[in-house]
Image (cartoon, rainbow, N blue to C red):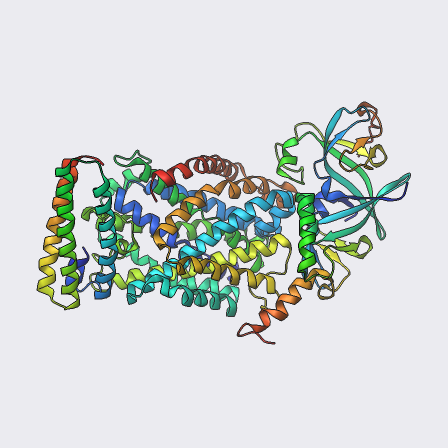
Amino acid sequence: MKRLDLFRDVLDKQVTDREKTKMGRVDGLVLELREGQPPRVVSIEMGFVVLARRLHPRLADWFLRLRRRVHVRKQACYSVPWSRVLDVSPFCVQLDVEAAETPAFDWECWLRDHVIAHLPGVAK
Amino acid sequence: MNMKKATQLALGIVTGVGGFFDIGNLATSAQAGASFRLQLLWALALGTILVIFLIEMSGRFAAVSGKALPDAIREHFGFGFWLVPFLVLTLVHVLVLASEIGGICFALHLLTGLRPAVWALPVAILVWLFLWRSIFSTIENSTSLLGLLALGFVVAAVQHHPPSGELLAGMLPSLPHHDPAKYWLIAVSILGSVMAPYLFYFYSSGAVEDKWDSSYVGVNRGIAFLGMGFGSLIAFAAIVVAALVLAPRGIEVDDYHQAAMMLTDAFPFWGFILFAAIMAIACLGAGIEVSLSMAYTTAQTFGWNWGEDLNPREDARFCLVYTGAIFLSSLLILFGIDPLKLTLFTMAISAFVLPFVAIPFLLLMNDRKLLKEHANGWISNTVAAFLLVLSIVLAVVTIPLVFLGGS
Amino acid sequence: MTGEKWIANGVPTSFVKTTWQSAREDLEQTAQDAAQSKARPAVRESLRDLISQTRAAGSSLRQAAEANDRPGAQLQAGRLAALRQQFEAWKKSVGPP
Amino acid sequence: MKSAKVHLELLVGREVHDSEGKRVGRLLSVTAEREGDDCVVREFLLGPAALLKRLGITTLHIVGFQRKKPLAVPWDQLDLSDPERPRLTCRADELKRKTT
């Protein structure tokens, strides 16, 4: 897709990794304003704190304070450089990453190892 | 229509029939029949027509766009717009799930005499195991096949030979002769129980799970019309039976015990057992659908991996949503909340949150860029617009009614 | 209705117990409402009398069911049906609450 | 001017004024083009639909909401240095009528 409407075709879009594993949504988009040149999309941002900031800045601050005490994800906001975007389709924004290695999957892996693994009937 | 689609159509209809009837329909139908005989049939007819269109639209949208409703709503309208409906609907779904679990517990209470609260945890574990161990198609088909047992109501209704004059009169909206607040509250609750929000999110996610594409629009229409149509037949029959068994004895249903004897006239010996079996199975099927619907909606909202066919290790968060939902809602029953009062209150609230369901429909189904020629025709649009107006009226009317109607 | 169904072997004994238990809760509730209501003393008196008779008939029906005594249950079921008639009549005489 | 960063998701539906403070419309769409690894903004679309902002709706392709045709603003005529108050670099009527 050559021409993109950043709001409609990218923002809030489902994000997937190389093998099309779902790994979250485009919660934020960062532009870089350059002198005398058109603004450039720098990165995609994902994470609860990004969503919180969209609702209200104070919510985001509160969320960050909460993270100091308890957090699973290494970084609150996982930002991916636009260069890693493989494809933008009506279904998803595909990134050239491996989902399990990214912070987007921290919660998923933590819950899998600490909760799911202990429940009956699950292959280790 | 190749073989695969034919079987999917047949299965879809069975799921529609089996999956339609749940604790909400049972409770509201029993109350409507016992208190107002056949006068409230129009509310069920109206709800059925609307739900047929809404289910058809949900399926068509998922088939053509390949996206389930929550997924598309977040993407099209942004997180800000979707967050409030999402939180409200999640709360409603917890209440609906608690009512379904309460229904199963009460059915077991009928059969064993043990208090419903005693059964809360074992039932929660049973519902959870259904989801944890089996894949999507087995869930959908097994509970719905058992759900056909509810056709017992239709047999009973036919045996009671309902007066056709009164039947037809009931199909037309009419004003109540006595305690209007209760009449309108039951009417609203019937609409709320028939157009339960989880139905649409579950159905559209199911269409994506079954990998439908735009060639399924015909199958989808058949399932919506026949599945929902036959499904509502059972609720009709339940009203008729309640009207011909409970009303003459002056019994109003404000406790499930009274409803439990509805089938004993038609089936003297095993009518009571049949009622308990229908109640348990209908609630089990619906409870599974509600918990799955919550997991789908949450996972799609935040973009997590989802799919009932995946092994729990692959979609931990998806599984933990339905696990958490099941045990959280079973606590309500554990604390001994009266299952019937909880169900009626939940159905009224389901009617109250209808605008949150109706608005996205009108907007999404007219997105020509996504749906191309399958976008809404003028008929579906008028129905969707009518539903929006109705849902706003219901939202305004429901809360005062809940206090006046004394549910 | 429960008595009638139990006699016809339509419902288990445990059901009679639980139905009577929840019916009694409703009765207590009605009794309390009646006590606080501002209706004329004569009206309140007749209602209280109806309630106590229903309470007696109900519990003896339960005992009959537990003792598997069908004739006994038949008697109580008849009394309860009659009491319901009286209650309907009483409601009409008092007019809408 | 160091390269300022702007969070686009916070600009959804933001009200835009022209250089003289006259209200021009709301930011409803940002059109960009992919060039190799880069993605460069070409123009902004301003629409009249205030309702869309309150509902937080990010798409303008909704039947019946597009009374006036959206106003296309080339990238170099919108100053985003202060994301709270995006402003045109000229008067509304001076906007170059670029046919998109």
**Viewer-nearest residue: D44 or A45:** A45
- Toward the bottom, the furthest residue is A124
Say if B297 sits above or below B399 in the image. below
Identity of the residue drawn at 48% across and 52% down: B93
Q: Tell me where residue C96 sits by quadrant.
A: top left
Does residue D14 appear to the left or right of B117 in the view shown? right
Residue B162 appears anywhere in the view: no
Identity of the residue drawn at 70% across and 61% down: A73
Residue B235 placed where, x, y %? 34, 50
Does residue B84 appear to the left or right of B103 in the view shown? right
Quadrant of the image containing the C terminus of chain D: top right
Residue A111 placed where, x, y %? 62, 66
Q: How many marks?
A: 0
Quadrant of the image containing the N terminus of chain D: top right
**Viewer-nearest residue: B55 or B202:** B202
Residue B387 placed where, x, y %? 47, 38
Residue B278 placed where, x, y %? 33, 60
**Viewer-nearest residue: D37 or B291:** B291
**Viewer-nearest residue: C4 or B141:** C4
Residue D98 appears anywhere in the view: yes
Identity of the residue drawn at 11% across and 67% down: C69
Q: Tell me where residue B276 sits by quadrant.
A: bottom left
